[in-house]
Amino acid sequence: MTIAVALLLGAALVAAVAPWLLRRLTRFVDPVALLVGWAVAVLAVAVTAGAGLAAMTVPLYAADSPLSRFVGGRLWAAVATAPQYLLYQLADTFALVVAAAAVARLVWSALRVGLARRRRVAEHLAVLRVLGDVEPGGPGEPPTLWLRSARPLAFSLGGRPGAVVATDGLRAQLTPDALAAVLAHERAHLRGRHHMVVACADVLAAAFPFVPLLRAAPGAVRELVELVADADAAGASGPDALRAALLRVTGAGAPDVALAIGRTAVELRLRVLARRRRPPSLAGRISRCGSLGMVAACTPLAVTVGLLWTASRVAGVLG
C-alpha cells in the first residue's frame, strides 16, 4: 500500500509541476526537444500512476522486494505482516475501478474528439477544393489551394491527403521570399504530422481535464509545433523573410481544426526569430531530445523514491 500511495503521489506531483517547468523552457530550448519532453512526461506520469494502481492489487507480503530493502526495513516489516483487512480489499477494488474508468474515458474521448475533428476537416477540404484553385505540389509535397480573398491568410489542414490553403491577398501583399517562407511553414506542419500531434493532446485534455499536465498540453503543443515549423521555414527562406510574413499575415478566418501561421503565439515566435542563430545540428538535436526525455522519464520515479525514503525515515523516528 505504501508503494502504491508513493507512486500515485509522485505521479500527481510531477503532473502538477511539470507544465510550469516545461513552459519556462519554451524560449530557450529546441522546440523539437520540448515536444519530446512533453510526450515523455505524459507517458511517464501515466506509467507511474498505472504502476501505483497495479501496486494496490499486489498482496502485502510482496513488499519484500529490492525497492523495499533499499528504502528501509522497519516500515516494510510492519506492512508485510499486516493482516488483509477490508481496507486493503477496498483498495484493490478501487484500483481496478479507477483503471477501467480511465481507459473508458480515454477511448470515449478519442472516438468523440477524433471522429468530430476528422469530419470537420473533411467538410472544410471538400468546400475549399470547390472554391479554390488547386496548385499541385512538388514530389512528395501537398497541393496548395488558392482562395480568392484580399485577406492575407494561410493555414494547413491535415488528413489523407492534407492541403495548404492560401489566399490571393497573401500572394499580393508578400514578397516572393516571404511567401515562400509561409508556404514552407505550412508544408512543415503536414510533413511533421503536427495536426495529429495536436489532436492527441486535445484527446488527452478532453479525457482528463483535471490533470494539470494534460490540461496544459494542447496550448503548449500548439506553440511548439509553430516554433518547429518556423525553424524549418527559416532554414529554407531565412528568418527575416519569415518575420516579415508574420507581421503581415493573419489567422482570422482559419478553421479551428487548422494550423494557421498567423494565429498562435506570434509575439513569442517573432522574439525567437529575432535571436535565431545557426540551426541545431542533427547530433545536437538528438542529444537534447535524449537528455530532456531522460529527465522527464526519470522524474516521477525519482520523486516516488524520495517519498518512500522520507516515509521510511519518519517511520523510523516514530518507531
Image (cartoon, rainbow, N blue to C red):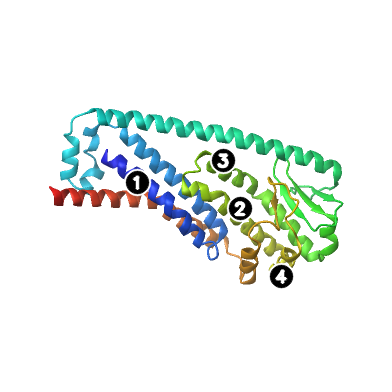
Please state which amino acid type lies under the numbered disc 3.
Val
Could you tell me which secondary element the residue under label 1 belongs to? helix
Could you tell me which secondary element the residue under label 4 belongs to? helix
Marks 4/1: CA–CA distance = 47 Å
- Identify the mark nearer the N-term, 4 or 1: 1
Question: x, y percentage for residue 78?
Answer: 16, 39
Task: Tell me the residue that label 1 is attached to.
Answer: 9
User: On the picture, is 41 further left or further right than 263?
Assistant: left
Marks 4/3: CA–CA distance = 36 Å
Could you tell me which secondary element the residue under label 3 belongs to? helix
Q: Nearer the viewer, mark 4 or mark 3?
A: 3
Question: x, y percentage for residue 23?
Answer: 51, 59
Please state which amino acid type lies under the numbered disc 1.
Leu
Question: x, y percentage for residue 145?
Answer: 81, 48
User: On the picture, is 63 further left or further right than 177?
Assistant: left
Task: Tell me the residue that label 4 is attached to.
Answer: 240
Q: Nearer the viewer, mark 2 or mark 4?
A: 2
Marks 3/2: CA–CA distance = 14 Å
**Disc on res. 203:** 3
Marks 1/2: CA–CA distance = 29 Å
Question: x, y percentage for residue 165?
Answer: 78, 50
162 or 112, nearer to the observer = 112
- Identify the mark nearer the N-term, 3 or 2: 3
Q: Residue furthest left?
A: 319
Please state which amino acid type lies under the numbered disc 4.
Asp
Task: Tell me the residue that label 2 is attached to.
Answer: 222
